[in-house]
Image (cartoon, helix red, strand yellow):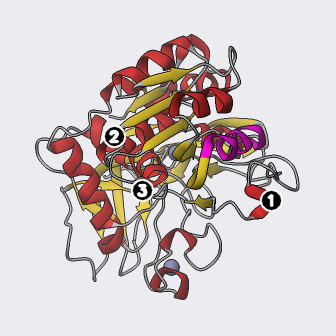
Amino acid sequence: MRPTTMKAFVMRDIGKVGFMEKPIPSAPGPNDAVVRTTRALVCTSDTHTVHGAIGPKHDLTLGHEAVGVVHRVGSEVHTVKPGDRVAVNAITPCFRCENCLSGFPSQCQAMLGGWKFANIKDGVFAEYFHVNDAEANLTPIPDDVPDELAVYCSDMLSTGFAGAEHANIPMGGTVAVFAQGPVGLMATVGARLLGASLVIAVEGRSERQALARRFGADEVVDPAKVDAAEEIVRLTGGGVDSAIEALGSEATLAACIRATRPGGTISNVGYHGHGENIGIPRLAWGVGMGDKTITTALCPGGRVRMQRLLRLIERGRVDPSPLTTHRFGFQDLERAFHMMETKEDHIVKPLIIFG
Ligand SMILES: [Zn+2]
Ligand SMILES: [Zn+2]
């Protein structure tokens, strides 16, 4: 007899997590698929969810960063078949609704609606997970790219690179990346790939400063020692062309605006989880007339983007492996999860190994 249940790591309630048995997703819809999980990554967003970022949830399977092997496909899915190694983005838009067809699939059906895993449906921290609209969202992984690197395309590469892509970096331009967590580090790589001539990383933790240099930062500014925006204006003689907010704090967004030259772009990929409003420093924003643009993005998904991200790993343009600071078996996911909450032992990303 084939097993019909699986282990899943869930949010039981606000502040509470644990394992439970759930049925293996059995019959995918005609456009959908079921994937057997092989590798996953814990994201700081998962900890935000458990602390109530999307309200109370009960027995919701957590996780949105994973790769695996196709287990079953619906009758209308022809681009992948059972047995294929596949990657899927954290965001799984329908690619049919008005927002998707308008060119904003992360806003599928409603604002932020492309985010379905561990939000409006079970996530990927289980032995199997369901993928909607599989032809648009599942991407075969190239033979030369191991699962443990491919899994970084789900969110870290896509979000970090989106930070750089939305920053309107001119060829030879100057860029500041605020915060060098895994997303900020990938924004640093992305800024280099897009032709920045100077990338300034803003980061206080020494181990992350070292990673920033390893991923291509030319300068590192420590916000605990200097006023980061002032220092960036000094280093660039007037401000950067592009500043990337990869933390999600009002003070950091303000620093990005102060660090950017007139006509520059502030690209936000940080999650702003607190307060009713976010302040903009009025004078640094040119009293609303400084031609400073603020852009936002939510982890762009879809098969074609995932193919491109995987190709960057395949061709050696980016190697995300230094982000994996810790490894855990699936059964030890709770320990990994709590380490992501406390950021103890200099954790950047814990890789979760299934099977
Ligand atoms: Zn994530
Ligand atoms: Zn849609």
Vertical order, 231 against 7 (above or below): above
Q: Is mark 3 within 8 Å of ligand 1?
A: no
Query: Based on the displayed image, in which of its 4 quarters is residue 83 positioned?
Result: bottom left
Q: Point out the tag, 1 or 2, that comes first from the N-terminus.
A: 2
Q: What stretch is highlighted in magenta?
A: 249-260
Q: Is mark 1 on a helix, strand or loop?
A: helix
Count of numbered tags:
3
Q: Does the magenta stretch include residue 256?
A: yes
Where does label 2 land, which residue?
192
Residue 17 percent across, percent down from the top left = 68, 36
Where does label 1 land, which residue?
287
Report the front residue among 6 and 335.
Answer: 335
Where does label 3 land, which residue?
165
Q: Is mark 3 on a helix, strand or loop?
A: helix
- Secondary structure character of the magenta stretch overall: helix
Residue drawn at the location 82% of the way across and 46% of the way down: 274
Residue drawn at the location 62% of the way across and 66% of the way down: 112
